[in-house]
Image (tube, rainbow, N blue to C red):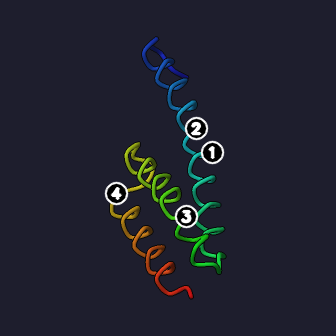
Amino acid sequence: MANHKSAEKRIRQTETRRISNRYVSRTTRNAVSKFRELTSKEEAQAKYPEVCSMLDKLAKKNVIHQKKADNLKSKLAAHVAKLD
């Protein structure tokens, strides 16, 4: 148990951030997996900036590493290029 007011506050902040990060992270992972299932090039090109934006926001908030976001965006771009 926390012995200081600041430690109690830190526990509250950490819990709030953890829940928020879990939600945003899961939402982004679902968007990436749905993006990978797309077969239409036009639809994928329209959806690509939206998914990239989600990844960038996760990296900016340090939920995922910047290089992981870059690698995912690169793989998604290759997926778009491969579509007919």
Using a 10 Å C-alpha cutoff, classify the residue at mark 3 as few (fewer than 14 neighbours), some (14 to 19) or many (20 or more): few
Q: Position of residue 49 (x, y in %)?
A: 47, 59
Q: Nearer the viewer, residue 31 or 14?
A: 31
- Residue 20 got which mark? 2
Using a 10 Å C-alpha cutoff, classify the residue at mark 2 as few (fewer than 14 neighbours), some (14 to 19) or many (20 or more): few
Using a 10 Å C-alpha cutoff, classify the residue at mark 1 as few (fewer than 14 neighbours), some (14 to 19) or many (20 or more): few
- Disc 1 to disc 4, C-alpha distance: 19 Å
Q: Position of residue 78 (x, y in %)?
A: 44, 80
Q: Hey, what amino acid is under mark 1?
A: Tyr
Q: Secondary structure at mark 4?
A: helix
Q: Secondary structure at mark 2?
A: helix
Which residue is painted at 65% across and 75% down in the image? Answer: 38
Nearest to viewer (mark 1 / mark 3): 3
Left or right: 67 as drawn, with respect to 84: left
Q: Nearer the viewer, residue 8 or 52?
A: 52
Q: Name the residue at the left extreme.
A: 67
Which residue is painted at 49% across and 18% down in the image? Answer: 9
Mark 2 and 1 residues: CB-CB less than 8 Å, in contact?
A: yes
- Residue 23 got which mark? 1
Nearest to viewer (mark 4 / mark 3): 3
Q: Nearer the viewer, residue 13 or 23?
A: 23
Q: Which residue is mark 4?
A: 66
Which residue is painted at 60% across and 75% down in the image? Answer: 36
Q: Secondary structure at mark 3?
A: helix
- Residue 46 got which mark? 3
Q: Is residue 32 above or below residue 60?
A: below
- Disc 2 to disc 1, C-alpha distance: 5 Å
Give the mark, 4 or 2, whose residue is nearer the N terminus: 2
